[in-house]
Amino acid sequence: MDRLNYHHLRYFREVAREGHLTRAAERLNLSQSALSAQIRHLEDRLGHALFERRGRQLILTEAGRIALDHAERIFGTGAELLAALGDGGHRARPLRVGAISTLSRNFQMRFLRPVLGEGPDAVPLALVSGSGGMLLPRLAGLALDVVLSTEPHDRAAFPELTAHRIAAQPVALVGTIDRMRGRDADWLLRHQPLILPTESSIRTGFDALCARRTITPNIVAEVDDMAMVRLLVRHDVGVALAPLVVVQDEIGAGILMQAPGDLGIVENFYAITATRNFPHPALKRLPPHTGFSP
């Protein structure tokens, strides 16, 4: 079977963008007849008409719209390839970030802040959420540049990956002002309904804390999504055990309040990367080895 001629595809894309054969021919420095012949070759190869003529205007057919969509992606991927291998001019290569779906959105924003914004230093992002079972194989296969997680990966399963501990956030009891005012952590643990994240290090620390203080907690919700923990405590369902980064905005706005004292529970955050010859240059602007204040 004949292969697709990408010169024909590039000519087609220019005509589709211009909507006019003469203007496209001028841009490509071709004669109108030569360009028309190239388009006919592509239509013959695909087996479909790509344009219909309305007066002097060329309008994409349904097949033409599908072909243009594929052409844009094909040439966009080519530009990314040049950027990835150091010959991309000013074309910015997207930074592909995977994040465990239960991870704090506030933490993700803090991590990505150095590459967000506008201007020549801005980096386009491709953000993907999912489970470790979905994201880590994609990182190992170089389809992602970094994966954000609250746990390091299984080194036996993914020996080519490296987990960088980038932050450690204190975990506290947090609730509405009326529920929290004048009460210490011990009283809250004994007498208030509790909202617990299922993240393993937090739950392990909580169970150990309750055992040390001989507390039988009243757990009203166990949630695997920090965004849902945040929503439940805002709606005064109970007192939440959460990393402060999750509820920093609500505490700053006076909507929620942190119980005094240190529970001795910490949540770690990791940036997991793969060994590669051409790492994304924007990774140097992110904090793989340093933490940040809450």
Image (cartoon, rainbow, N blue to C red):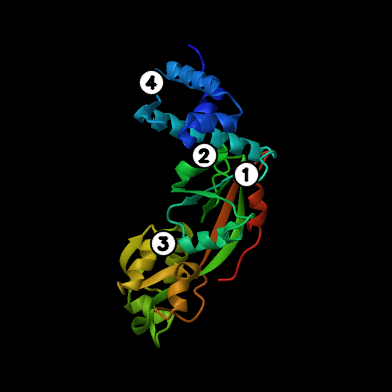
Q: Residue at x 51, y 30 (%)?
A: 22
At x 36% / y 60%, what residue is drawn? 223
On residue 158, the disc is none
Name the kind of residue labelled 4 in the image: His
58 and 167: which one is in front?
58
Q: Quadrant of residue 78?
A: top right
Of the numbered discs 1 and 2, the one sitting upstream in the chain is: 1
Q: CA distance from mark 4 to mark 3?
A: 50 Å
Q: Which residue is mark 1?
A: 91
> What's the amino acid at mark 2?
Arg
Q: Secondary structure at mark 3?
A: helix
Spot occupied by residue 97 in the image (x, y as percentages of width and height): 53, 49
The span from disc 1 to disc 2 (Cα, nearest Å) is 24 Å
* Nearer to us in this view, 26 or 176: 26
Q: Residues within 10 Å of mark 2 (few under 14, many from 20)?
A: some
Q: Earlier in the sequence, mark 1 or mark 3?
A: 1
Q: Residue 36 at what x, y percent from top left?
A: 49, 21
Residue that carries the numbered disc 3 in the rendered image: 226
Which type of secondary structure does the marked residue at label 4 adopt? Answer: loop
